[in-house]
Image (cartoon, helix red, strand yellow):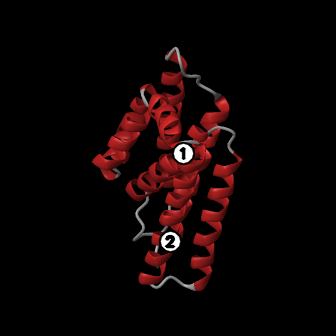
Amino acid sequence: MVQRRIGEIVKLRRLSKITIALGIYIVASAAFMLKIRNWLFKVFGNFIVVTCFRLFFILIFVLTITHAFRISLNLFKICAVFVIFILGYLFSMWQPYFSEKTHVLTYGLLGYLAANDFVDTKRKLQFKNVVLAICFVASISALDEIFQSILPYRVGDARDFITNVISGAFGMGLLLTLKNE
């Protein structure tokens, strides 16, 4: 009975190749992103790297707001998009390490894509589909942290797991807000 139900869920809600690829990239990049980050800081310096990150965050915000106006969202939803981005940005800046700041964007994107795959925005919102999207983001985050704990130069941390899941929820919230009814 349970296997049949799981089979129905898998048939009805497939993850896109891009969502799966991003999840795999997030986990695999734990092996090399620290070295790339250290190289970027060494070559360009702290100020340039952090400023570019902030500008990238702002660029994504501007593109999202432009999209919101293009699809004619009402003022309440546009304000909600603004609030989600402000909270995401503040959450990002609150993170003590640069790697965790970037996870707000990467896991936010993963949450957005997972929600896009699991939640049918043309139908009534179903709680179980949102839970499936959150579970997918949490699974990728758990794999990421487990992989980091195996690597000799990385550390897996429960706080990072929670940060990643919250970041994914920001992305899911963004998709659900941009849902034009």
Tell me: residue 103, above or below residue 122.
Answer: above
Mark found first going from the N terminus, 2 or 1: 2
Q: Is residue 41 visible?
A: yes
Give amino acid for label 1.
Answer: Thr
Please state the horizontal and vertical placement of residue 100, each as a whole percent of the image: 59, 40
Please state the horizontal and vertical placement of residue 117, each as a whole percent of the image: 38, 55
Horizontally, residue 17 falls left or right of residue 32, namely left
As drawn, the label of residue 102 is 1
Q: Which residue appears at 53% of the width and 38% of the height?
A: 41
Count of number-bearing discs: 2
Tell me: residue 58, above or below residue 41.
Answer: below
Helix, strand or loop status at disc 1: helix
Image quadrant where residue 79 sits: bottom right
Q: Which residue appears at 62% of the width and 81% of the height?
A: 76
Helix, strand or loop status at disc 2: helix
Mark 2, residue position: 62
Tell me: residue 130, above or below residue 103.
Answer: below
Please state the horizontal and vertical placement of residue 35, each as a whole percent of the image: 46, 28
Residue placed most toward the observer, 133 or 157:
157
Horizontally, residue 176 falls left or right of residue 91, namely left
Give amino acid for label 2.
Answer: Val
Query: How many residues crowd mark 1 within 10 Å: few (<14), some (14–19), many (20+)?
Result: some
Tell me: residue 96, above or below residue 133.
Answer: above
Q: Which residue appears at 55% of the width and 22% of the height?
A: 154
Separation (CA) of disc 2 from disc 1: 18 Å
